[in-house]
């Protein structure tokens, strides 16, 4: 999953948690605000009655103090204005048949759903009545008792929550959108870093990244640039060492070819001459003692050894591209395989592009790759048809493509992991030339492809 989506998902989760916390806080605050309104109503009514009490005490001092505040006189419109909506206030001691004086509760708030009306009182509890004395200095003046209306308080709380949630949702959506854009903008350079690493994985080590504003991303970009420089230097050094090792190995192969030709070739020729002499002498004596037959078998074995030696010398000596050129040497290579035996598989040669001016290490590497792949396909497989295709891709990507396909079966993964000297050798040669080698399954067999840059 992309990092931007992960961060945005976590941000949305945090916003949802904050929204849930805000909803809970709004519910608690709205529900408890009724208690504050109840206490405030009781306090305001008590203060109003206190003024009425002392007014009656001064004007009608002959009356008993418990009758200084006639009940009908405090139930006025002015007193109603002091009572918050959804709160009922009564004066004690109350006279007979007196009802509480309640604030307006009809049409207050929105009708809450049933689950809200049942859940909120369960978790937050019920509202308590508030008692305030009319006059702290005169206990006989009576008290004011304010009681909240449960249904009205829940309706007010629900309306308050809806108003708060609307604003909170808009803020949460705005925060989530702006934060997502900010996160995407901040992490946009990460794509450039990933693309640079992918180019480095393909061998393009000199990949300069732009300067980033973020200190962390700038440090990562600097580390990637430094890594690319070190990888390019190491690759160049390894390629130079590999080329030197290949040159040394080629020199050793040529020296070994001379030794084999001078020593083994002459000795085999001498053995063959002696065997022919013995066979001729035995035939002239006309003796049936088996010597002529043994000498003939020695001659056949010597011929076989000499043929094997010639084949080995062909592989050890300087490759033909240095003498004939790449195109002629490839034609000669295919013709030599075709002429060895009629039972050999069919070998098709397909040459595309201008191969005339290809020489030096690139031509040698291409010839060795074709030679080794044809040898493996003929000797180590049951192929009936082998295709050798050599193509020069001109233009900016001036490179040589060598592809050998066969229908002899084989496991591409196992061959890829093989530590044989042949594949190891051509892989080293291709790598030293700055190219790439791949072994993939083909229709009925294997496909070995090598790309050799001609500018290397």
Image: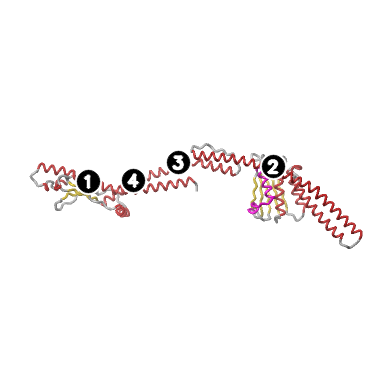
Mark nearer the N terminus (4 vs 2) = 4
Disc 4 and disc 3: Cα gap in Å?
A: 26 Å
According to the image, label 3 marks what residue? Answer: 182
Residue 393 in sight from this viewpoint: no
Magenta span: 412-434
Instruction: Please indicate whether residue 241 sits to the left or right of residue 139 in the image.
Output: right
Mark 1 → mark 4, Cα distance in angstroms = 25 Å
Q: Pointer 4: what residue?
A: 164
| Label 2: element kind | helix
Q: Main secondary structure of the magenta part?
A: helix
Q: Earlier in the sequence, mark 3 or mark 2?
A: 3
As drawn, the label of residue 41 is 1
Judge depth for marks 3 and 2 and give the one in front. Answer: 2
Of marks 3 and 1, which one's residue comes earlier in the chain? Answer: 1
Q: Disc 4 or 3, which lies upstream in sequence? A: 4
Circle 1: element type = helix
Which residue shows up at 68% across the image and 53% down it?
406
User: Which of the two labelled residues, at mark 1 and mark 2, occupies the earlier sequence position?
Assistant: 1
Q: Judging from the image, what secondary structure is the residue with disc 3 in? A: helix
Tell me if residue 196 is in the magenta stretch: no
Q: Which mark is residue 244?
A: 2
Task: Compute the Cα span from label 3 to label 1.
Answer: 49 Å
Q: Nearer the viewer, residue 191 or 417?
A: 417
- Taking the image as shown, residue 52 lies to the left or right of residue 24, namely left
Query: Is residue 428 highlighted in magenta?
Result: yes
What's the CA distance linking mark 3 and mark 2?
A: 54 Å
In this view of the protein, which residue sits in the foreground, 156 or 247?
247
Question: Earlier along the polypeptide chain: callout 1 or callout 4?
Answer: 1
Marks 1 & 2, CB-CB < 8 Å contact:
no
């Amino acid at each position: 999953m992309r990092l931007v989506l992960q961060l945005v998902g976590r941000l949305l989760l945090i916003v949802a948690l904050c929204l849930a916390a805000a909803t809970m806080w709004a519910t608690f605050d709205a529900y408890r605000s009724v208690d504050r309104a109840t206490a405030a109503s009781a306090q305001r009514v008590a203060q109003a009655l206190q003024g009425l009490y002392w007014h009656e005490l001064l004007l009608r001092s002959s009356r008993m103090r418990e009758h200084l505040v006639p009940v009908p006189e405090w139930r006025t419109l002015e007193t109603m204005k002091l009572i918050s909506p959804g709160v009922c206030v009564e004066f004690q001691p109350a006279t007979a048949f007196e009802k509480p004086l309640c604030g307006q509760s009809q049409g207050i708030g929105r009708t809450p759903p049933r689950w809200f009306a049942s859940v909120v009182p369960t978790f937050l509890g019920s509202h308590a009545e508030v008692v305030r004395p009319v006059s702290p200095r005169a206990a006989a003046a009576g008290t004011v008792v304010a009681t909240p209306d449960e249904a009205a308080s829940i309706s007010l709380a629900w309306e308050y929550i809806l108003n708060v949630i609307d604003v909170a949702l808009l803020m949460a959506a705005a925060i989530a959108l702006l934060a997502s854009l900010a996160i995407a903008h901040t992490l946009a350079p990460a794509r450039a870093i990933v693309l640079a690493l992918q180019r480095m994985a393909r061998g393009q080590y000199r990949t300069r990244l732009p300067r980033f504003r973020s200190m962390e991303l700038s440090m990562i970009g600097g580390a990637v640039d430094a890594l690319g420089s070190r990888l390019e230097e190491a690759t160049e050094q390894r390629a130079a060492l590999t080329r030197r090792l290949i040159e040394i190995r080629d020199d050793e192969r040529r020296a070994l070819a001379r030794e084999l030709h001078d020593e083994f070739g002459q000795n085999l020729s001498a053995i063959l001459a002696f065997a022919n002499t013995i066979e001729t002498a035995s035939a002239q004596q006309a003796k049936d003692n088996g010597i002529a037959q043994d000498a003939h078998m020695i001659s056949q074995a010597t011929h076989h050894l000499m043929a094997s030696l010639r084949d080995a010398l062909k592989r050890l000596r300087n490759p033909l591209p240095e003498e004939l050129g790449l195109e002629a040497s490839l034609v000669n290579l295919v013709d030599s395989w075709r002429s060895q035996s009629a039972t050999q598989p069919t070998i098709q040669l397909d040459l595309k592009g201008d191969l005339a001016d290809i020489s030096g290490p690139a031509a040698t590497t291409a010839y060795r790759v074709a030679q080794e792949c044809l040898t493996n396909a003929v000797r180590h497989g049951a192929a009936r048809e082998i295709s050798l295709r050599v193509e020069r891709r001109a233009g900016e990507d001036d490179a040589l493509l060598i592809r050998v396909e066969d229908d002899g079966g084989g496991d591409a993964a196992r061959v890829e992991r093989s530590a044989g000297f042949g594949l190891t050798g051509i892989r080293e040669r291709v790598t030293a030339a700055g190219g790439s080698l791949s072994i993939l399954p083909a229709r009925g067999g294997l496909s070995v492809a090598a790309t050799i840059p001609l500018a290397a």
